[in-house]
Amino acid sequence: MSSRPLEASAYLQAARAHWSIENGLHWLLDVVFDEDRARNRKDHGPENLAILRKLTLNVLQRARPGISIRRKRKRSGWSNDFARSILGQMR
């Protein structure tokens, strides 16, 4: 928990804030990257791929804000020029 004395409502608010961030990230990873169906189970594979998914998600979220993440992934797969434009926006 916490060493700081708080009222129950403050603890509840902190817990909800934490889980809303947590659920939002996992929902995106599952919906956009279908992470729950990943079959890599050996050695460092799952951890490495999770890092790559999160890195990719960060790049896609920052580039071209008017387009959905799913659409950016699809267009990047169809067009090398579009993929380069997404990667070119990394800093």
Image: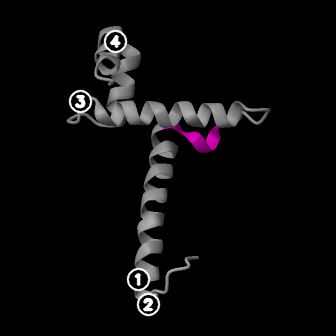
* Residue kind at label 2, given as amino acid type: Glu
- Residue 24, numbered label: none
Within-10-Å neighbours for mark 4: few <14, some 14–19, many 20+: few
Query: Looking at the magenta stretch, what is its main secondary structure?
Result: helix
| Mark 2 touches mark 3? (CB < 8 Å) | no
Of helix, strand and loop, which one carries label 1? helix
Which residue is under mark 1?
Answer: 10
> 60 and 8: which one is in front?
8
For disc 2, the marked residue is 7
Task: Of the two numbered discs 4 and 2 on the same chain, state the one appearing first in sequence.
Answer: 2
Please name the amino acid that badge 3 sits on. Arg
Between marks 4 and 2, how big is the CA–CA gap? 54 Å
Callout 3 secondary element: loop
Query: Which residue type carries mark 1?
Result: Ala
Q: Earlier in the sequence, mark 1 or mark 4?
A: 1
C-alpha distance separating marks 1 and 4: 49 Å
